[in-house]
Image (tube, helix red, strand yellow):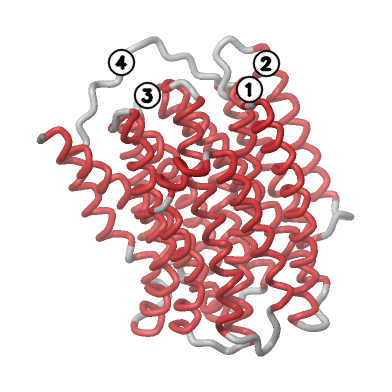
C-alpha cells in the first residue's frame, strides 16, 4: 500500500519539476513584447530569447538521454533541476537582452534534462500496466504548466514585472524537489563499465548547433552571407560524419536502429509538426495580440491559455483514447489538428472575433498533447527499457530542431514582408501550412501501411 502511495507521490514530484520547464515555454512567450520594449529589441534579436532555448534543447537531448541511461535517470534529473533553477534566477536579473539570451541558453540545457529524464523516469517508477495512466497524468500536469503560463505571465507582468516570469520557477522547484526527495525510491543504478562516445558527442553538438544557427542566421543576414553558409554547411557535414561514425562505432551515442520502427517514425512526424506549430505560433500569436490588437498582458495571457488548456484536457483523456483508437490513429489525429490549426491562421485578421481566434489555438493544444503523450507511450511500448531515455531524447530533439528551424525561417519571411503586419503574418502562415500538408500526407500513408500490416 505504501509503495503504491509513494509511486504516485513521486509522479507528482517528477511532474511538478517538469512542469517548470513546460511553464517556461508559454510564460516567457507572454513576456516577449515587454522584453522587446524594455531592451528596444528588434524582432530578429528577440527571436533568440526563444530560439537559443530551443537550440540548447536540440543540441543536447540525445546526449542527455544517453547519459541518463548510462549514469542513472534520477541522478541526471536532479542535475537538470539545479541547473534550470539557477539559470531562471539569472535570467530574471539580466540587465540586457544579451544576458537574457545567455541564461535562456542555460535554461534550455536544464530543460533538456527535465524533459528527457522526467518522461523516462515513469518507466522506472511504474509497472507496465500502469504506464498509460501515469503518462496521461504526467502529460496533463506538465500541460498545466503550458496552460497557466500565459495567464500567470499576464498577472505577473501586470502586477509586478516581466522578470517574475523567470523567478516564479524557484518555489515550484523547491516543492517538487522535496516531494521527489521523500518518495522517489529507485534501486541503485547498476555499476558497470561506462564507455562514452565522446567523438559522437562533440560531432552531434557542433553539427546540430551549426545547422540550426546557420538557418537562424540566414533569417538575419540572408543566404548570401558567408557566415550562413559556413555554419550551415559545416553543421551538415559534421552531422553526416556523425552518422557515418555511429554506424561503425561499438558504443554509439545514438542507436540508429530505433528509427527503423514504424511507430517511432509516426511519433517523429507528429513531433516535428508539433515543434513547428508550437514554436512558430507561440511566438507570433502573442505579437499579433499585443502589437496589432493592443491586448493587455492579462487579456493576451487568457487567450493564449486556450492552447495549453486543450493540451491538458487531451492529456487526461489520453489513456481511454489510446485504448479506443490505438496509437497510430491518435498520431494521425495529432497531425490533422496541427494542419487545421496552422491553416486556421489564414482566417485571423485585424478584428477577428475572440471565439474564432480560440479555434486554431485549441487545435494547437490538441496536437501538442497527443504528440507529447503519444511519443512517451510509443517509446515505452516498442523500445527496450535500457534505451528509453535515448529514444525520448532523440524524438524530442526533432521536435525542438524543427521548431527552431521553422521559427528562424518564419522570422525571416516575416522580416522580408514588412509592408504590413498582416501581409507578413499571412506569408509566414503560408510557408508553415505547406510543410504541415506534407507531413499530413506522409503520416496518412504510414498509418495506412501500419493498419494494412495489422490485418
Mark 4, other Cα within 10 Å: few <14 / some 14–19 / many ≥20: few
Give the Cα distance between marks 4 and 2.
Answer: 27 Å
Q: Is residue 393 above or below residue 331?
A: above
Going 34% across and 49% down the picture, which residue do you hit? 137
Give the Cα distance between marks 1 and 3.
Answer: 21 Å
- The answer to which of 353 and 198 lies nearer the viewer is 353
Going 61% across and 61% down the picture, which residue do you hit? 48
- Residue 277 vs residue 414: left or right? left
Q: Earlier in the sequence, mark 2 or mark 1?
A: 2
Mark 3, other Cα within 10 Å: few <14 / some 14–19 / many ≥20: some
Residue at mark 3: 71
Residue at mark 2: 247
Mark 2, other Cα within 10 Å: few <14 / some 14–19 / many ≥20: some
**Residue 23 appearing in the image:** no
Asked whether disc 2 touches disc 1, contact meaning CB atoms under 8 Å apart, the reply is yes
Task: Single out the residue that lies furthest toward the left.
Answer: 2
Give the Cα distance between marks 1 and 4.
Answer: 24 Å
User: Exactly how many numbered labels are in the figure?
Assistant: 4
Give the Cα distance between marks 2 and 1.
Answer: 8 Å
Amino acid at each position: 500500500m505504501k509503495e503504491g502511495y509513494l509511486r504516485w507521490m513521486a509522479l507528482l514530484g517528477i511532474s511538478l519539476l517538469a512542469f517548470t520547464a513546460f511553464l517556461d515555454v508559454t510564460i516567457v512567450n507572454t513576456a516577449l513584447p515587454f522584453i522587446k520594449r524594455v531592451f528596444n529589441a528588434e524582432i530578429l534579436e528577440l527571436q533568440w530569447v526563444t530560439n537559443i532555448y530551443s537550440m540548447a534543447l536540440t543540441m543536447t537531448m540525445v546526449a542527455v538521454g544517453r547519459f541518463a541511461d548510462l549514469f542513472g535517470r534520477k541522478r541526471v534529473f536532479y542535475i537538470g533541476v539545479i541547473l534550470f533553477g539557477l539559470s531562471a534566477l539569472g535570467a530574471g536579473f539580466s540587465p540586457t537582452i544579451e544576458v537574457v539570451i545567455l541564461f535562456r541558453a542555460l535554461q534550455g540545457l536544464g530543460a533538456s534534462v527535465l524533459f528527457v529524464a522526467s518522461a523516462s523516469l515513469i518507466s522506472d517508477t511504474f509497472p507496465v500496466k500502469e504506464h498509460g495512466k501515469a503518462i496521461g497524468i504526467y502529460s496533463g500536469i506538465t500541460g498545466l504548466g503550458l496552460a497557466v503560463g500565459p495567464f500567470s505571465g499576464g498577472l505577473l507582468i501586470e502586477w509586478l514585472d516581466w522578470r517574475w516570469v523567470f523567478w516564479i520557477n524557484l518555489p515550484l522547484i523547491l516543492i517538487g524537489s522535496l516531494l521527489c526527495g521523500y518518495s522517489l525510491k529507485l534501486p541503485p543504478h547498476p555499476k558497470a563499465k561506462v564507455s562514452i562516445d565522446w567523438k559522437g558527442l562533440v560531432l552531434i553538438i557542433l553539427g546540430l548547433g551549426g545547422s540550426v544557427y546557420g538557418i537562424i542566421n540566414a533569417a538575419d543576414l540572408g543566404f548570401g552571407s558567408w557566415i550562413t553558409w559556413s555554419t550551415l554547411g559545416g553543421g551538415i557535414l559534421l552531422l553526416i560524419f556523425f552518422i557515418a561514425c555511429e554506424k561503425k562505432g561499438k558504443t554509439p551515442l545514438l542507436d540508429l536502429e530505433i528509427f527503423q520502427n514504424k511507430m517511432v517514425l509516426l511519433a517523429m512526424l507528429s513531433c516535428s509538426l508539433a515543434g513547428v506549430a508550437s514554436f512558430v505560433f507561440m511566438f507570433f500569436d502573442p505579437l499579433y495580440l499585443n502589437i496589432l490588437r493592443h491586448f493587455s498582458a492579462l487579456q493576451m495571457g487568457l487567450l493564449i491559455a486556450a492552447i495549453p488548456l486543450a493540451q491538458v484536457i487531451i492529456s487526461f483523456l489520453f489513456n481511454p483514447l489510446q485504448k479506443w483508437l490505438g496509437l497510430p490513429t491518435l498520431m494521425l489525429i495529432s497531425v490533422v489538428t496541427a494542419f487545421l490549426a496552422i491553416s486556421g491562421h489564414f482566417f485571423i485578421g485585424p478584428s477577428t472575433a475572440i471565439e474564432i481566434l480560440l479555434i486554431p489555438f485549441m487545435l494547437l493544444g490538441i496536437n501538442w498533447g497527443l504528440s507529447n503523450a503519444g511519443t512517451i507511450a510509443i517509446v515505452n511500448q516498442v523500445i527496450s527499457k535500457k534505451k528509453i531515455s535515448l529514444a525520448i531524447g532523440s524524438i524530442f530533439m526533432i521536435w525542438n530542431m524543427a521548431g527552431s528551424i521553422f521559427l528562424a525561417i518564419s522570422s525571416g519571411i516575416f522580416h522580408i514582408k514588412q509592408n504590413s503586419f498582416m501581409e507578413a503574418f499571412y506569408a509566414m502562415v503560408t510557408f508553415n501550412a505547406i510543410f504541415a500538408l506534407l507531413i499530413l500526407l506522409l503520416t496518412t500513408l504510414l498509418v495506412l501501411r501500419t493498419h494494412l500490416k495489422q490485418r
